[in-house]
Amino acid sequence: MKILEPSPNLDRRSFIKKVLNGTIAGSLYLAFPIGGNTLDLPEQIPGIKGKPYDIQNQEFAFIVDITRCIGCGSCCVADKREYNVPDGNYRTWVERYVKGFSDEIYVDSPNGGLDGYQTPRDDINEEVRDTFFVPKLCNMCKEAPCVQVCPVGATFTSPDGFVPVDEKRCVGCAYCIQACPYSVRFLHPETKVADKCTWCYHRIRKGLLPACVQVCPTHARKFGSMKDETSEIYKILKGPGVLTVLKKEMGTFPALYYKGARREVI
Amino acid sequence: MDVAHGSTAALISSYVFPNDLHVHWSMMIVLYPYITGLVDGAFIIAALYYLFDVKSLKPVAKFSLLFAFAFLFWATIPLLLHLGRPERNLNMLLTPSPSSAMAGFGYIYAVSMGVLVFIVLFVYRPQLVELRATSKGYLQLLYRALTFDSIDLSEKAIALDGKIIKFLVGIGIPIAAVLHGYVGFIFGGVKANPTWSTPLMPVIFLFSACVSGISAIILAYIVIRKIKGRSIDHGCIRTCVKTLTLFFILAFTFEMLEVFSHSYLKSGYHHMVEGLLNGPLANSFWLWQVKLGSVLPLAILGVMGLIKLKDTLYSSLAAIVSAILLIQVLIMRWNVVIGGQLMSKSARGYTEFHPEWFDKEGILAVIAVMALPFITLFILSKIFPFWSQSNTSKAK
């Protein structure tokens, strides 16, 4: 039996034609998207993605559950990577509280808890009764003293309850840093303007959770909308449990609440 | 410092919030209230003469105005050196936030400067008119501008000058009070800092400002006259010292009242404030500000006020007391501005401050900024004679 195979066409002209056709076809992929969009993630905060954002009718809250925090530092790492936070400055940090039987409190936060708490404290000369971790971040105060003192209006309260910093307007006077009772602000060493935790506003606007909330392995950090009655935030805040805020006597009315907070936490 | 309070947190281990380690308001922010304080104090002396007719102050009246002007002229420099973005400083004038005390700076400074410039021009108008007559070219153009192109030195014109000066000094006093008082409020309005937040802060700042300014006038007057080999008007020194004593008693009383009432009330974070004053600031506050800087001058002023002393001894003591008080006010500003930031908002620890030499807010910068007004004063002395003489042209 004779098998007839067509002989391959090996001349230069057809080769160039094939390459050219392939390039044109391939370059169409640049014009027409075919998926792989990293923002096409499932929504984490219901009701935001794909809908017009009503900035006047939002109410978000952040809850930190101290009974769940294990001091792993994942939140600090995620935050540092999200914003390229310069070393020595902290948008969020985790504190370690150790209570002895004499009721003395030992607090520390080596590198803001960024490395996790790998080793116990070796400088405590009494038996340890209790220990817990306290994450700290911007309290997004409803009556923020930082907003009150900013001379140029670079920091202000947005209609949806956030307190951002306009880095194009800030003059770097550091008054807001002095005025914050929670020490969450710092002066960025490179841009020389004030900086702080923003509750990942750019992620929230896309229906994503703040980075620190998303990576927390024990769900110690919680975030959600008070306008959404199915959210965990709504249920906790409207429920019977005890929620506290930091430095209540300052009259700042934070939107950051602590669940299971201890009286030693300042 | 290791005190346990029943239901509140016991303070033991030194814990400073991670963002509290760095002291943000550095030496330039110590210097700014000091400079505006000198302006205020010098202005008080001028006001006592021009508005309240305290004739014994005539020898230093004009000098005080120029002294105030020389320092006010450079008052913005420490602030510009402090700002992270000084090129945006006009934002304070363009988009001021009405709730911020600091936003008042641009307007308050502009008004103060305007009023002070006009006072100086009206006080020196006769001399400037004479200088215009004897000069030529661009210098004459300058003098014409400075005298509003008028050569009217008639009795009626001089009388009107006097009225205008009285009016300007009259509105100048509250303006000067706001110029330095608002700085006190910048600190007093910060509830987050227990050492700063007190209604007494603007009052303490104002009174100690007057102390520094009057001391500066006394010391500068004595030193400059001694260098030039001229006589000192002892009656003038006595009046200045009496005014200084009054303001200093008030300033010291309020400073101590602040500390002792907190220590008695024992509310809030008082243990942190006490820990600060008895710990990191023990020397700076109790030794330098209180004992050497306040109690010692009070004793000297007491002797000067109660015992009849010879003029030369009196004036020598006046110079010594003035020098001590000038340093005391600077130390007080340091203790408030930098000392107040040493206390962490964690209420559990203190951080440290180490002044740099070559920083834009460093020691050399401080020396340069304090030198500039004196250089300006020297230049001004060539245009505006300091001391009232019948023969005025370029006399010093």
Image: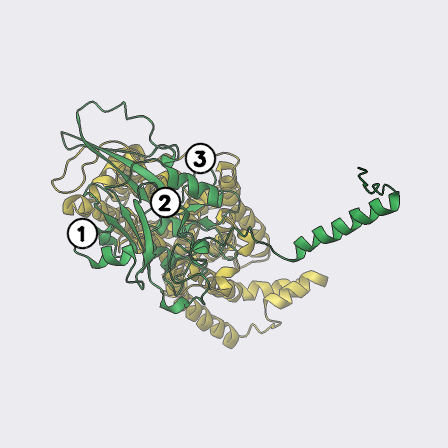
Chain colours: A green, B yellow
Q: Are marks 1 and 2 in contact (CB under 8 Å)?
A: no
Most extreme residue toward the front, as rendered? A1
Pinpoint residue A128: horizontal percent, then vertical percent: 18, 28
User: Dot 1 corresponds to which residue?
Assistant: A242
Residue that appears at 33% across and 39% down:
A94
Q: Which mark is residue B355?
A: 3
Q: Are marks 3 and 1 on the same chain?
A: no
Q: Are marks 3 and 2 in contact (CB under 8 Å)?
A: no
Given this view, does label 1 or label 2 mark the residue nearer the observer?
1
Pinpoint residue B123: horizontal percent, then vertical percent: 50, 64
Most extreme residue toward the bottom, as rendered? B156
Q: Quadrant of residue B326?
A: top left
For the question of whether residue A4 can be seen, the reply is yes
Q: Are marks 1 and 2 on the same chain?
A: no
Chain under disc 2: B
For the question of whether residue B113 can be seen, the reply is no
User: Dot 2 corresponds to which residue?
Assistant: B337
Q: Nearer the viewer, residue A206 or A102?
A: A206
Pinpoint residue B266: horizontal percent, then vertical percent: 16, 45
Q: Nearer the viewer, residue B183 or B226?
A: B183
Q: Gap between marks 1 and 2, in whole Å?
A: 38 Å
In-image side of B181 versus B226 (left or right): left
Chain under disc 3: B
Q: Few, some or many C-alpha atoms within 10 Å of disc 1 (few <14, some 14-19, many ≥20)?
A: few
